Image (tube, rainbow, N blue to C red):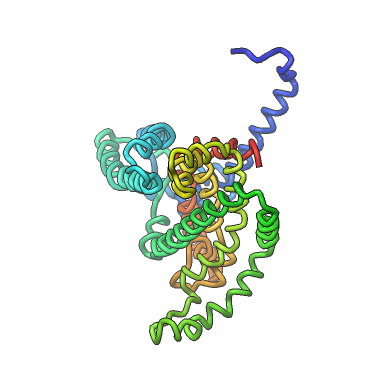
Amino acid sequence: MSSPKALRQPVALRALSGSFLAFWCLLAAFPIVWIAVMSVKVPLDAFAANPFDVILGPLTKAQGRGLTGLDIAVLLLGLWLAVRVAMRILPGLAARYSPPGYRVLGWIVVILGYGIALFLLGFVVLPPVLGAINAALGLDPLIGLTTQHYQAVWVENAFWKNFVNSAIVTTGVVTISLTVGTLAGYGLARSGSNLAFWLLIAALVFRALPHSVLVAGYLPVFIHSAEILRPILGENAPTLYGQPLAVIVVLVSINQPFTIWMLRSFFQSIPAELDEAARVDGCTHFQAFRRVIMPVMWPGVITTGLFSFLLAYNDFLVTSLLLDQSDMTMVPAIAGYFNRETTMTDQVEAIAAAVSITAPLFLLVMVFQRQIVSGLTAGAVKG
């Protein structure tokens, strides 16, 4: 269906806006693509002055490590299929097979299962199969590629421990933020008192505080937590400093005002008549909230949860100040590669680690892209 003539943009304006959008996409995607290319090259290729040497990797290829034309074709086909499955099939599987009332758990299982399947297929099954086919056909590498830096990061440097720490922190932050945020946002959205307005203003003020202020305020409490908790827990009272729980507390304090504001906007876009109809049918306030409002609110909850996830996943200041080296999350751990006397190999390993932590973000956006768009649209309607 063609748009009305009055709404059509001039050709020059469309060309200008399209060119600007294409330039912005190229500018935003370039660093991610470039470090991904660098991470699979030997150090001399990764930091070569000639950009074509970085892309083609002649020294990497000379060591017998690379991709043949068949490998490249299978890789591109696999990426296309992975994106299609993540965007078209996984949301339907999660919605269809999640137990009633446990949709979040269903999403978590689907995402973890899909990530594990991609890892096994891409790094365990396909490499030996393609290697055997290439040897049988006598195909030579066209582009140099090596996974030695990823193996060094995840196996030799035990980066998987940092991944586990990041998973603990992000899971705790998202769970607490959404649990408190949905209840508080619903209550404030349905409250007509002036107290709700001033509570939201106070939350906004606390959200505007620098993160270092909250860290400095909590730090003495965490350091002396064993003495504070000893009258309650006895001699087994823990010291919270250096533990992921301390980071979760601070990040929830930082994130909670934003979560409440955002979820309140989503709740305000839902007509109050739904609550009234549920109450007429015999539901209590909480039953109306859980059985009627929350199923409508899932796009908003997923969108808000994604922002909470990004805050905890990408945090550097709080985690680097409150965690020991052994309990460090991924982002400050990557920075640790540059805090010692680094070699070119260390730097490429740091790049490989940085590329690794972007994979979950792409997977989340691909899987939840419909809910995110729907949630952002719903939150912009009213609030």
**Location of residue 150 with respect to 80 vertically, above or below:** below
Is the residue 202 above or below the residue 83 in the image?
A: below
In this view, the residue in front, 285 or 178, is 285
Residue in the foreground of this view, choosing between 77 and 89: 89
Residue 177 at what x, y percent from top left? 52, 57
Q: Quadrant of the N terminus?
A: top right
Q: Is residue 367 visible?
A: yes
Determine the residue positioned at 66% across, 35% down.
23
Q: Residue at x 49, y 48 (%)?
A: 285
Name the residue at 66% across, 33% down.
21
Question: In the shown orientation, is residue 181 left or right of residue 232?
Answer: right
**Percent from the top left, x then y, of residue 29?**
58, 42
> Which residue is at the front of the view, 187 or 230?
187
Residue 322 location in percent, x, y? 54, 72
Q: Is residue 40 left or right of residue 27?
A: left
Q: Residue at x 43, y 79 (%)?
A: 238
To which quarter of the image does residue 265 belong? top right
